[in-house]
Amino acid sequence: MKPILTLSLVCAMALPVSGQVIAAFSGTKVPEAVTVPNISAEPLSRGPGLTVSGGPTFNSGNWTSDKSIDTRDYIEWSVTADPGYTVDITELQINFDRDPDGFSHFFTGNGPARIRIRTSLDDFKSDIYAHDKVSNSGQSPTIETALKSAPGASIIFRLYGFAANIGMLGPLGTLDIEGGLGTVLGLENTGIRLSGKITYDGLQFNNGTWTPYAPSAKTGDKNIIIGNGVYTEANAVQVKNVKVNPGAGILIQKTGSLTVNGNLFTANKVTLESGSDAFASLIVSGEVAGTVTYKRQMKTKTLLSGSGNELLISAPVTGETFESFRKANPNIVSNTANSQFQFGPFNKTKAAFDKYSKKDKPILKAATGYRAAATDNGSFIFNGNVNTGEVHKTMSHSGPALAAWNLLGNPYPSYLKLSDFLLANSEQLAPESVGIYSFNGDATRGWQVYNQAYLTLYPQAKLPPGQGFMVAAKKDGDTITFEPGMRTIGKTSEFLVDKPIIKNNVGYLKLDMTSGIRNYSTEVYFNDHSTKGLDPGYDASIYGGKAPDFSIASQLVEDHTDLDMAVQSLAYTDLDEGVIIPLVVKATKDQALTIQMKGSRLPEEVDVYLEDKQQGTFTLLNLSDYQLDPNANLSNSGRFYLHIVNTTLTYGSHGLNELLIATSNASHILQIKQVLKPDTNITLYDLQGRALIQRQLNEQIKNNTLDLSKLSKGIYILKLRSGAMEKIKKIFVY
């Protein structure tokens, strides 16, 4: 490898002025080069037509005797500006000599009598120096130039020689680059020196001040350099190349982001912050030289045992060992001996989360998820390399339990588009569990599922940096892929970012079951992509497939095969036609339960009823909560059903559409008209689900009536049943 030296100046930001020496090249057998900061150089080398001759100087032989240039016969050297810099060369001085001297040239011939110096700026077409009478004594011409590189580009010089004399023994004459310029920039035996200036072509930060102006979201084509001090950013910024000088730094606050369209030189002093509500982002398209620090916000947990305030996380920057990470983060939850830590991956052979010990020294890898907890609500500090390319994570379908489940994580120090991730990886996931699963503090309260159904409501959803999550691999699933194009910026801590942009044909409801401080929930979506059966990507089973001891879940309306669903997705038209959804409620006896509709996005005319078949009650969840104090454990399906009712249409009639149900508020009479089938029963409920009136109707008459005069003013639910057919309507009594 050719020696290349860079001269370190005392003041790194003192850029050279016009006429200052910026590079020197030795005229020695083993060539060297030295430069001032912010540029580099390649020492002297030979073109393919030349040979190496002896002696202590840079001697080259086998020059062409033709009277025109042979493009293979040249001596080459170059300078290259660092990213964001330009090189202006105003002067070149070179010390060369044509050999041999005296009588011996009759035998060996002479080196080239003519030389031309050209540059790569015009593809070596024009001369910046020409000499047609090269003598056999040393010469050191000074050549004035006006050469300027593009930002971050090179200027390559070539000295072409021709018109060499052939002696009796052949073309053995040489042209030598010698060291007659003395010591330049600390380099002895300098044969070529370049003078000029180096200019930063971009935005400069020094001690809190930007020149000529600060970067912004619109400066994606501008280079920046942090000369002195720490540049702090709280907003979204785009730039081309970034260089941090030694001793300087960059701090991206939790609401900020830095998108680098080129390369990043960190000087190991770039830091990103996060909070409970926002995470900083760093996206680099090119290469990253140096490490980056990411401060990942955590929650407070004081004891290693028990649950609560645990998070699934990943390393936003990677490559450090757990030992190094542990020493930098004394707030990792540990046992009293400080020998075991609440930090570790999901162990497939045990179907459980690992806890690293003091002896463990694994490397924190990209895309690996970890369960972790902190003793305070501060941050975990990660220091490592920035992943800028594709990251592949192999999944496993194995283990004594939870065989499909693998703990992964966002490998980038930026947000990740959920839609892009699912599009690229859904085929690798189990059909009944396509999506990503995560929990916020306590898995016993249920896992939040982010899948295609979620995207119908929140199409811009993103995974924050440092987010861990579970996925279920199908039996022949292989590799999960994270692609650079999935990266994006954001401002919020959870998957929902900003206000959703959604179509009209999207509905949603969330059922929440609570008992004291315990709670669990299940979700139902309505969209144009789903059916009553299993819709991979839109329906999602509960983590592990079966509901835990305290939980609420649904089962598929059709072909459910006893699979407990965390997310069920149905057709949007089911909001018009009505649908009955089987529920699974699990709880222990003497445990007071409350089931409520915690959140919804439904048309005004849609009512949601919770039916308790054992109690014979209907509860309108739009207005009231369902409450129960069971005297036996709840564990099976078949007792609870969710009825989705459109009050402007008949619902669930299955052959009862011909019936006309009407009320006469003047006389408080309910009328049921048309021909009835035998064993047609009517039940009237209040909004708490209590049956107030029950009666079998007379199929012999076409107009059955029901006296409502004893009822208070309000809303009631009417259920009409004939065999397996039923019809539900909401009525108003004034």
Image (cartoon, rainbow, N blue to C red):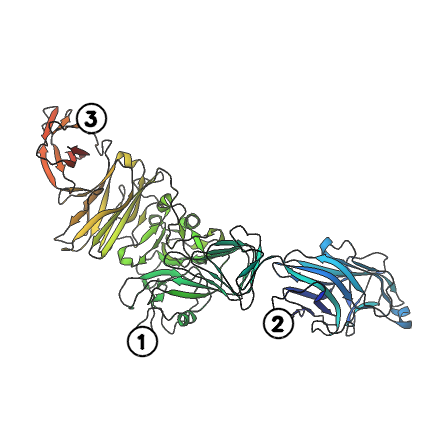
Query: Mark 3 sits on what residue?
Result: 658
Query: Mark 1 sits on what residue?
Result: 337
Please tell me which residue lies in front, 521 or 51: 521
Amino acid on which the number 1 mark rests in the picture: Ala
User: Could you tell me if the residues under marks 1 and 3 are in contact, i.e. CB atoms within 8 Å?
Assistant: no
Q: Determine the CA span between mark 1 and mark 3.
A: 75 Å
Q: Count neighbours of disc 3 (C-alpha within 10 A) and say few if under 14, some if 14 to 19, many if 20 or more.
A: few
First along the sequence among labels 1 and 3:
1
Query: Mark 2 sits on what residue?
Result: 10
* SS type, badge 2: loop
Give percent across and percent down for residue 674. 16, 24
Left or right of 54, for residue 513: left
Give percent across and percent down for residue 234. 46, 57
First along the sequence among labels 3 and 2:
2
Please tell me which residue lies in front, 635 or 198: 198
Give percent across and percent down for residue 672. 14, 27
Q: Nearer the viewer, mark 1 or mark 2?
A: 2
Quarter holding residue 352: bottom left
Q: Nearer the viewer, mark 3 or mark 2?
A: 2
Please tell me which residue lies in front, 340 or 384: 384
Left or right of 450, for residue 640: left
* SS type, badge 3: loop
Left or right of 98, for residue 689: left
Q: Nearer the viewer, mark 1 or mark 3?
A: 1
Q: Count neighbours of disc 1 (C-alpha within 10 A) and say few if under 14, some if 14 to 19, many if 20 or more.
A: few
Quarter holding residue 180: bottom right
Amino acid on which the number 2 mark rests in the picture: Val
Give percent across and percent down for residue 348. 35, 62
First along the sequence among labels 1 and 2:
2
Amino acid on which the number 3 mark rests in the picture: Glu
Q: Count neighbours of disc 2 (C-alpha within 10 A) and say few if under 14, some if 14 to 19, many if 20 or more.
A: few
